[in-house]
Amino acid sequence: MNVAHHLERHLGPMERGWSSSSLPGVQVCVFREQPCAGVVTLATLGLSDTILTMSGDRRVRQELLLAVHEGTKLEELAKILLHVAELLIRRGRALLRGDLVPLGTKIDPVSAADALYASIPAVFSEGLATIRESTPPTVVLWLI
């Protein structure tokens, strides 16, 4: 199963997306009403084309999720996800559960948050977290 089908199976149809000329092959897609009503989920698609290292000789592929209230400015958050994806590709290392990703700027003007926390996608449907058909497996991380 490819990543796009996996995401749509668990999050519903993709509504739209953004890409960046500095990160060819990676985009951010929008899914409405996921994981619940009134929430929009943004997900990377294409980040998993890059194999990332973990401790020891372990390797993994990753995609990232970010869930926000309906009405949030999605384009700015898509830029943040693309920034994090670019950071992961540049450094070649995977994010681990519990990692903090400093952004160097506030996530949004009314928030003091300037970092994202990596977690398993606990509030999403079971099965979303891992695509075992890829080699190495693709892990979907929820950024909070």
Image (spheres, grey):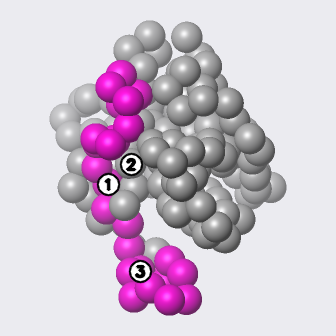
Quadrant position of residue 124: top left
- Describe residue 61's horizontal placement relative to residue 16 as left or right: left
> SS at mark 2?
strand
Of residues 100 and 135, the one nearer the viewer is 100
How many labels were placed on the picture? 3
Quadrant position of residue 80: bottom right
Residue with the mark numbered 1:
118
For the magenta stretch, what is the residue range? 104-129
Which numbered disc, 3 or 2, marks the residue that appears first in the sequence?
3
Of residues 46 and 52, the one nearer the viewer is 46
Q: Count residues near mark 3 (Cα–Cα under 10 Å), then give few for <14, some for 14-19, many for 20+.
A: some
Q: Position of residue 63 (x, y in %)?
A: 49, 39
Q: Residue at x 36, y 22 (%)?
A: 127
Residue found farthest to the front: 37
Q: Do the numbered discs 2 and 1 sit on residues whose CB atoms are within 8 Å?
A: yes
Q: Residue at x 41, y 80 (%)?
A: 114
Residue with the mark numbered 3:
114
The type of residue carrying mark 1 is Ala
Q: Is residue 79 visible?
A: no
